[in-house]
Image (cartoon, coloured by chain):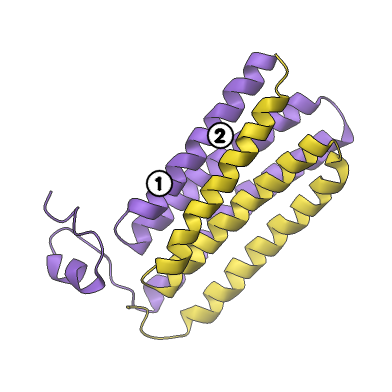
């Protein structure tokens, strides 16, 4: 039981770290939203599910599972709506073949050569 | 193995991740980057609230706060995205 709690919490911490590194390091908004939506949701679900498993069969576990379902439904939906708003308002998509765009926005210089 | 020190370590780790994410809030080239990072900070703060509830052994109250925080975070990101959708020129 304790081993399951350790594995779940450390896995959740790993995915949260991956999500933060992606948001800091990736070159444009769309790839950042990709990193944020999936890794963050998986890390939060792992932490909340592990805490519900640790807490046992109580009312608090029901609340934790409710928060888990809410996070799993709303976090990708909000980021999808944000990405659609960015696409409709004309934010350009970064590609490695357009270094002019990368230079103009001042982002992803270290990635454009690879 | 009592996992209580693991809860404290994970809470400190999530607080550090929130501090790191504020870099993207402050620096982000477009308004959408800032809004994405604000959503990420809110989602991390939800986990921090739940862990603080487990550390202080008042999980019932802090879980209600976390539920409210999840709903408010979603509505805030959705409303600001809907507002920015009608505005032209997202490029910096």
CA separation, marks 1 and 2?
14 Å
Q: Circle 2 is placed at which residue position?
A: A12
Mark linked to residue A78: none
- For numbered disc 2, what is the local secondary structure? helix
- Residue occupying the point 65% across, 62% down: B73
Which quadrant holds residue B52? top right
- For numbered disc 1, what is the local secondary structure? helix
**Where does the C terminus of chain B fall, quadrant-wise?**
bottom left
Place of residue A60 in the rendered image (x, y in percent of width and height, measured from the top left):
84, 37
Residue A82 in view, yes or no? no
- In the displayed structure, would residue A40 be above or below residue A33? above
Q: Colour of chain A?
A: purple
Which quadrant holds residue A44? top right
User: Counting other residues with Cα less than 10 Å from the Cα at mark 2, is it few (<14), some (14-19), or many (20 or more)?
Assistant: many
- In the displayed structure, would residue A47 be above or below residue B91? above
Q: Circle 1 is placed at which residue position?
A: A21
Which label sits in the foreground, 1 or 2?
1
Chain identity of mark 2:
A
Residue B5 in view, yes or no? yes
Place of residue A64 in the rendered image (x, y in percent of width and height, measured from the top left):
76, 40
For the colour yellow, the matching chain is B
């Amino acid at each position: 039981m304790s081993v399951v709690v350790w594995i779940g919490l450390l896995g959740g911490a790993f995915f949260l770290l991956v999500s933060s590194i992606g948001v800091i390091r990736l070159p444009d908004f769309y790839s950042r939203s990709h990193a944020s939506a999936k890794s963050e949701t998986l890390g939060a679900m792992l932490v909340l599910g592990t805490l519900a498993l640790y807490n046992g069969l109580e009312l608090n576990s029901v609340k934790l599972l409710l928060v888990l379902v809410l996070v799993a439904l709303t976090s990708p939906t909000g980021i999808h709506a944000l990405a659609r708003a960015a696409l409709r308002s004309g934010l350009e998509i970064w590609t490695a073949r357009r270094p002019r765009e990368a230079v103009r926005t001042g982002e992803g210089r270290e990635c454009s050569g690879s | 193995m009592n996992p209580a020190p693991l809860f404290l370590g994970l809470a400190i780790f999530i607080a550090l991740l929130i501090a790191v994410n504020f870099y993207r809030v402050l620096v982000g080239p477009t308004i959408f980057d800032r809004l994405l990072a604000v959503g990420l900070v809110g989602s991390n703060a939800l986990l921090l609230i739940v862990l603080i509830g487990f550390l202080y052994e008042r999980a019932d109250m802090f879980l209600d706060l976390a539920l409210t925080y999840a709903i408010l975070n979603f509505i805030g990101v959705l409303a600001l995205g809907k507002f920015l959708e009608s505005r032209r020129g997202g490029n910096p």
